[in-house]
């Protein structure tokens, strides 16, 4: 059974051909128009059908009084091959045939194909040919497209559902039905991961013709679509949409409340006064007494998190993470992948975090949901970063950025947060400070996100601690303790270290108390290990058992960055206890780990401590600072190392020549070469 609609490549609206492609297509069109009229007509039928099976083309052509013999002239001209199917010698030949025909002739070709296509055997092809045969509006065809759309939606084919609903809306004559179908098409595009296209379609919804449910759905969708750019602007709209949906669609209202609560957490102190409190009250009131479900857990967990009760929030968040790691969320819950990964970090469930991001990335790749895939790639990169595989993390961040460029979306600011976190560990001090300052400025002026602001401050705390600037680290981190009543455990253990080393054990104790609450409520190895490390830092002469417990616990989870930090702190404590031999073991382990992962600030700190024990610190080769090539860059590089031209590389990889040029410049920089002639040597090819 064919499942793809006919032919997007040569079909109407395909305007991607440019430059030389336009010229070549015009040359092919001239050759086509030199053929007999009957040959051109049969070629058009073949060009209008994706599979172009000979039996189907013959049957459709016969309805117009044409025969297979009419293809002979096209074969002799070298434009097609005819066997079991009609195969165009080049995609631009098909494009020339289809695009060069009059619109009425294209519609007639699709009508012929619809007439010979069995809707039971090939439902997608049949409904698309019907849709392509219509001029103006046609309710019967629109209804058929919608019915088929619901069928493919049930099978998880969200991109196909979005395409079917978009065309159904275009063919709808009734204004009320038009508003409903246009809204459904925009929602389907969002679910499919095409956020920009969803926004474009949403602008076509005529609210004055929409029913109340459609209006509320459109309001929600507008808020979700503005989430990434400036979350604070979307929050009030999302709250209003959730309230409007309560009586119209209770399930969607719950989804919208979850999105609003999550957005309030991201917005933080920049939320309009009183709005977060109103949102929490409305979201909890919308739940049925004793309701037990994923959405109820998410509402209760996020609401408690926002009001500062982490002990109450954690059980619901843990249940949500466990459920989302095993199941798919409702399709309308487009932020589920973001929420699940953030909650996994909140409860320090690193063992659930990676499966969640891997599952989301695999699903989004299969659906072609590139907008959503970016976030999942960044989640995978964050996991690699936490486990000390900085090159892998950088490659995944780079792939996410490349996706942004490939879909024409240059909103790469969110990647800056993650890259500056990575940069704190591996970049020079000046670069790190500049990146942190840039993210902080964006957070408080342009994006107005408390989450962004917190991430920038956390990075500064880690940088100052790595350099031994403990008073500066405390100055940067303590405002976070005052702003956020349930501050994340990771920065709390940094503040414990900074406060203790600055002689402020009162502040260290306050941060440690917060950390203890987080660890007890989270019930995860990672949280327990961080808490044990915090206790060890302030325990004085009794620290050893706590350090050993921290090492034993953190050694069971993939967080080598924290494990290395614990070896370093333990070694520093041992040296101050005049146990130099034992200190060398811990400090040497820390130094090896930091050097291997490519963390120069912490590596130098460990080296200084080792030298203070009387050990001779041998220079070890640092981790490679060269960036690995992405899969696409590798493919381009290997082709460019041979005789293929830029345009041939572009054609073989379905890219534009300018995109190939862009990637090659990055390949040259990463491999340290300046021309294609040197690529083969750099790649190790003969």
Image: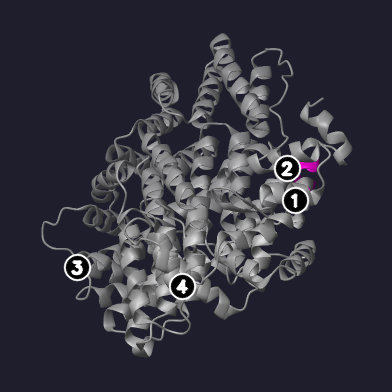
Secondary structure under badge 4?
helix
Dividing the image into 4 quarters, which one contains the C terminus?
top right
Give whichever of discs 3 and 4 has the lower sequence position: 4
Q: Going by the image, does 433 lie left or right of 448? A: right
Give the CA distance from mark 1 to mark 4.
Answer: 40 Å
Nearer to me, 644 or 474: 644
Give the CA distance from mark 4 to mark 2.
Answer: 42 Å
Mark 3 or mark 4, whichever is nearer to me: 4
Looking at the image, do the residues carrying marks 2 and 1 touch, with CB atoms under 8 Å apart?
Answer: yes
Is residue 668 located in the magenta-colored stretch of the structure?
A: yes
| Mark 4 residue crowding within 10 angstroms, few (<14) / some (14–19) / many (20+) | many
User: Residue 286: which numbered mark, if any?
Assistant: 3
Instruction: From the image, tell me which residue sits under label 4.
Output: 111
Secondary structure under badge 1?
helix
Instruction: From the image, tell me which residue sits under label 1.
Output: 660
Query: In x, y percent, where is residue 81?
Result: 64, 51
- State which region is magenta: 665-669
Nearer to me, 106 or 523: 106
Quadrant of residue 144 in the image? bottom left
The answer to whether 393 is drawn above or below residue 681 in the figure is below
Give whichever of discs 3 and 2 has the lower sequence position: 3
| Mark 2 residue crowding within 10 angstroms, few (<14) / some (14–19) / many (20+) | many
Give whichever of discs 1 and 3 has the lower sequence position: 3
Quadrant of residue 183 in the image? bottom left
Instruction: From the image, tell me which residue sits under label 2.
Output: 636
Looking at the image, do the residues carrying marks 1 and 4 touch, with CB atoms under 8 Å apart?
Answer: no
């Amino acid at each position: 059974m064919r499942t793809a609609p006919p032919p997007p490549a040569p079909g109407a609206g395909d305007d991607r051909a440019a430059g030389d492609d336009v010229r070549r297509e015009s040359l092919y069109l001239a050759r086509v128009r030199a053929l007999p009229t009957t040959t051109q007509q049969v070629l058009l039928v073949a060009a209008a059908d994706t599979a172009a099976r000979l039996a189907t083309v013959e049957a459709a052509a016969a309805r117009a009084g044409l025969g297979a013999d009419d293809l002979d002239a096209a074969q002799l001209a070298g434009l097609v091959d005819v066997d079991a199917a009609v195969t165009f010698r080049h995609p631009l030949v098909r494009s020339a045939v289809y695009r060069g025909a009059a619109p009425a002739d294209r519609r007639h070709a699709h009508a012929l194909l619809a007439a010979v296509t069995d809707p039971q055997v090939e439902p997608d092809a049949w409904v698309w040919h019907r849709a392509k045969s219509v001029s103006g509006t046609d309710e019967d065809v629109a209804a058929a497209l919608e019915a088929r759309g619901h069928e493919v939606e049930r099978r998880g084919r969200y991109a196909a559902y979005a395409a079917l609903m978009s065309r159904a809306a275009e063919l709808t004559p009734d204004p009320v039905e038009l508003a409903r179908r246009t809204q459904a098409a925009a929602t389907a595009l969002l679910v499919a991961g095409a956020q920009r296209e969803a926004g474009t379609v949403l602008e076509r919804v005529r609210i004055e013709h929409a029913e109340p449910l459609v209006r509320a759905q459109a309001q929600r969708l507008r808020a979700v679509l503005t989430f990434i750019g400036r979350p604070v602007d979307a929050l009030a709209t999302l709250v209003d949409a959730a309230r409007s949906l309560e009586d119209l669609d209770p399930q969607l209202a719950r989804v919208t409340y979850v999105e609003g609560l999550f957005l309030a957490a991201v917005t933080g102190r920049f939320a309009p006064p009183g709005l977060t409190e109103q949102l929490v009250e409305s979201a909890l009131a919308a739940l049925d007494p004793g309701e037990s479900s994923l959405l109820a857990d998410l509402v209760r967990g996020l609401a408690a998190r926002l009001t500062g009760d982490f002990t109450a929030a954690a059980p619901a968040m843990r249940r949500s993470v466990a459920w989302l790691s095993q199941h798919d969320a409702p399709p309308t819950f487009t932020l589920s992948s973001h929420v699940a990964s953030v909650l996994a970090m909140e409860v320090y469930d690193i063992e659930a975090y990676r499966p969640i991001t891997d599952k989301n990335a695999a699903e989004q790749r299969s659906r072609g949901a590139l907008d959503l895939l970016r976030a999942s790639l960044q989640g995978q990169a964050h996991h690699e970063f936490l486990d000390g595989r900085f090159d892998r993390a950088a490659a995944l961040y780079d792939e996410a950025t490349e996706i942004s460029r490939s879909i024409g979306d240059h909103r790469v600011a969110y990647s800056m947060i993650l890259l500056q976190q990575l940069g704190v560990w591996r970049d020079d001090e000046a670069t790190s400070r500049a990146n942190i300052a840039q993210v902080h400025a964006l957070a408080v002026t342009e994006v107005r996100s408390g989450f962004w602001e917190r991430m920038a401050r956390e990075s500064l705390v880690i940088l100052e601690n790595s350099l031994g600037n403990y008073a500066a680290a405390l100055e940067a981190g303590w405002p976070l303790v005052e702003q956020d009543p349930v501050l994340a455990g990771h920065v709390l253990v940094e503040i414990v270290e900074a406060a203790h080393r600055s002689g402020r054990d009162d502040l260290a104790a306050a941060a440690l108390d917060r950390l203890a609450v987080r660890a007890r409520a989270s019930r995860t190895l990672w949280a327990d290990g961080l808490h044990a490390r915090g206790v060890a830092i302030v325990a004085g002469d009794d620290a050893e058992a706590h350090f050993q417990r921290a090492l034993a616990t953190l050694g069971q989870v993939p967080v080598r960055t924290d494990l290395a930090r614990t070896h370093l702190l333990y070694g520093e404590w041992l040296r101050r206890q005049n146990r130099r031999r034992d200190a060398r073991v811990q400090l040497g382990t820390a130094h090896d780990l930091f050097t291997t992962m490519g963390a120069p600030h912490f590596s130098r700190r460990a080296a200084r401590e080792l030298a203070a024990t009387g050990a001779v610190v041998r220079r070890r080769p640092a981790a490679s600072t060269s960036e690995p090539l992405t899969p696409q860059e590798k493919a381009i590089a290997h082709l460019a190392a041979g005789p293929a031209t830029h345009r041939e590389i572009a054609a073989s990889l379905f890219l534009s020549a300018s995109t190939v040029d862009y990637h090659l410049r990055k390949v040259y920089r990463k491999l340290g070469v300046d021309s294609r002639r040197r690529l083969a040597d750099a790649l190790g090819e003969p």
